[in-house]
């Protein structure tokens, strides 16, 4: 890996206020390289604004289930009712250019020696969640890189596979990429946190020190929630941003 800080964002979900806070923080830290793990859209009221802002800064990106749903490639029956309403609304709101962009996104990609995928490396399009040690155990066999970065669950944390076996940490503090260990790191959601912390989340990777830094940031939650209500989207989608659930 070349020097320079890397950052990973995921699950933006059309939340412009959260994305703006994250991008401002990246600039403050001097992050040089950025990737996105998918779910650019869905739930939030600013899908075009988010893609327009993020796309020019991305070195790589993969597709999320909400992106695929907006493209009409998933039966919305698998979504809860608010998610389905938001997917239809987003489908009608998305510009042709941004729709084409989502169409180009791959399921998984290797970027700077790290595996990127929205849900799981074993079956990227099955949209499984990696929530337990048992879930993670199977997934380590599905990629060969040292680090796999995932999103999808909106629950940040890191699974570490080392000589002593597999363990899990919430990943609230910086942690090292230790020699002889492999990792599946679940990145926090930028635009719809669900771990009880309403702050926007993302990750910074420092390749020089082999350190991963999870970041959480206050943002204008009220404004993002207000846009959701103003767009006529389900008010529950606005409310949950305030709780982070
Ligand atoms: Zn998501």
Image: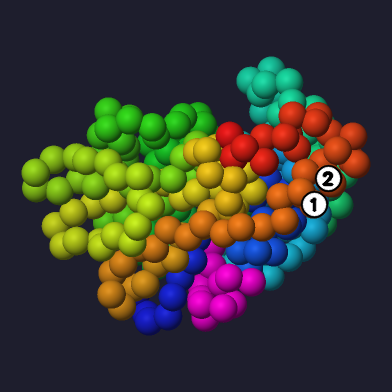
Q: Above or below — where is 141 with respect to 220?
A: above
Beta carbon of the mark 2 residue lies under 8 A of ligand 1: no
- In the rendering, at what x and y percent does residue 99 appear? 78, 49
**Residue 26 shown in magenta:** yes
Inter-mark Cα distance, 2 to 1: 5 Å
Figure coloring: rainbow
Q: Which residue is identified by label 1? A: 223
Question: Of residues 29 and 52, which is closer to you in this image?
Answer: 29
- The image position of residue 180, as x and y in percent, is 14, 57
Q: Quadrant of the N terminus?
A: bottom left
Q: Is residue 176 shown left or right of residue 94?
A: left
Q: Which residues are magenta?
A: 24-35
Q: Secondary structure at mark 1?
A: helix
Circles 2 and 1: CB atoms closer than 8 Å: yes
Q: Position of residue 216 (x, y in %)?
A: 51, 57
From the viewer's perspective, tell me whether residue 202 is left or right of residue 63.
left
Q: Quadrant of residue 53?
A: bottom right
| Residue 123 located left or right of residue 87 | left
User: Residue sitting at 79 percent across and 52 percent down?
Assistant: 223
């Amino acid at each position: 890996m070349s020097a320079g800080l890397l950052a990973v964002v995921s699950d933006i979900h059309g939340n412009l206020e959260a994305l703006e806070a994250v991008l401002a923080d990246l600039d403050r830290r001097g992050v040089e390289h950025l990737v996105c793990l998918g779910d650019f859209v869905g739930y939030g009221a600013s899908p075009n604004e988010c893609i327009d802002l993020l796309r020019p800064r991305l070195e790589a990106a993969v597709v999320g289930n909400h992106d695929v749903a907006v493209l009409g490639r998933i039966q919305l029956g698998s979504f809860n009712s608010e998610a389905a309403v938001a997917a239809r609304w987003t489908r009608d709101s998305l510009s042709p250019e941004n729709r084409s962009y989502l169409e180009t996104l791959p399921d998984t990609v290797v970027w700077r020696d790290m595996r990127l995928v929205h849900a799981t490396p074993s079956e990227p399009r099955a949209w499984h969640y990696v929530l337990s040690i048992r879930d993670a155990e199977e997934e380590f066999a599905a990629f060969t890189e040292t680090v796999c970065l995932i999103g999808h669950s909106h629950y940040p944390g890191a699974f570490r596979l080392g000589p002593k076996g597999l363990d899990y940490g919430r990943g609230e503090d910086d942690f090292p990429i230790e020699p002889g260990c492999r990792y599946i790191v679940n990145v926090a959601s930028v635009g719809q946190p669900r771990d009880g912390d309403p702050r926007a989340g993302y990750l910074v990777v420092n390749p020089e020190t082999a350190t991963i830094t999870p970041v959480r940031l206050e943002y204008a939650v009220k404004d993002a929630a207000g846009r959701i209500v103003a767009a006529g989207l389900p008010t529950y989608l606005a409310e949950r941003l305030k709780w982070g659930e």
